[in-house]
Image (cartoon, grey):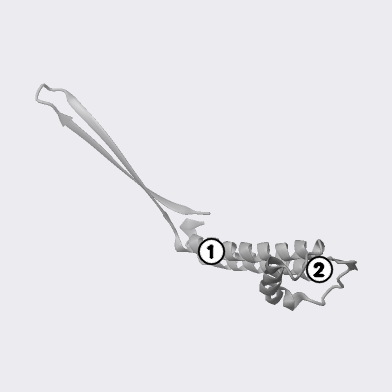
Amino acid sequence: MSETEQTTEVHETTTQPNGAQVQRHNVSRTSQTSGIVIAQRFIWFIVGVIDALIAIRFILLLLGANQSAGFVDFIYGITGILVAPFVGIFGEPIYGRFLFEWSSVLAVVVYSLIAWGIVKLITLTRPQEEI
């Protein structure tokens, strides 16, 4: 990701009363991240959190976690809304208490692709010198 960096250099030469010359060299650097880069990082952070929650859901379902446990119920409650649009697209094989939930896998893929598309769209609006 592109970040702008500004460097200021100051060269100063002074002559001492005894005729000696003293040179000073000061360098100052500042770095500033553009708003576009911050927006891209924010989008990837949000999608990363969503994908991580859905991945936890997938693992809990795959391992047959007890839904009456507080943490498991919390994860299922939060991610149920995120996975709901993808439920029923593929069959979900059940092996006893273990469930391979294709809708969770599909949700991670689709949300990641949407984020990638949005980030690329934001990149199109960057000035040419930032690319």
**Among the two numbered marks 1 and 2 on one chain, the one whose residue lies closer to the N terminus:** 1
Drawn side of residue 4 relative to residue 125, left or right: left
Rendered residue at 83%/65% (across/down)? 100
* Amino acid of disc 2: Trp
Determine contact: label 1, label 2, CB under 8 Å: no
Residue at (67, 70) in percent of width and height: 74
User: Is 12 in front, or is 40?
Assistant: 40
In this view of the protein, which residue sits in the foreground, 120 or 102? 102
Residue 28 located left or right of residue 72: left
Depicted 31 relative to depicted 123: above or below:
above
The numbered mark at residue 52 is none
Residue 122 locus on image (x, y percent): 54, 67
- Tell me: 27 left or right of 32: left
Q: List the residue tagged with mark 2.
A: 102
Q: Is residue 124 above or below residue 31?
A: below
The picture places residue 66, in percent across and down from the top left corner, at 78, 67
Q: Residues within 10 Å of mark 2 (few under 14, many from 20)?
A: some
Q: Mark 1 = which residue?
A: 42
The residue lying at 73 percent from left, 78 percent from top is 85
What is the x, y in percent for residue 6?
A: 37, 49
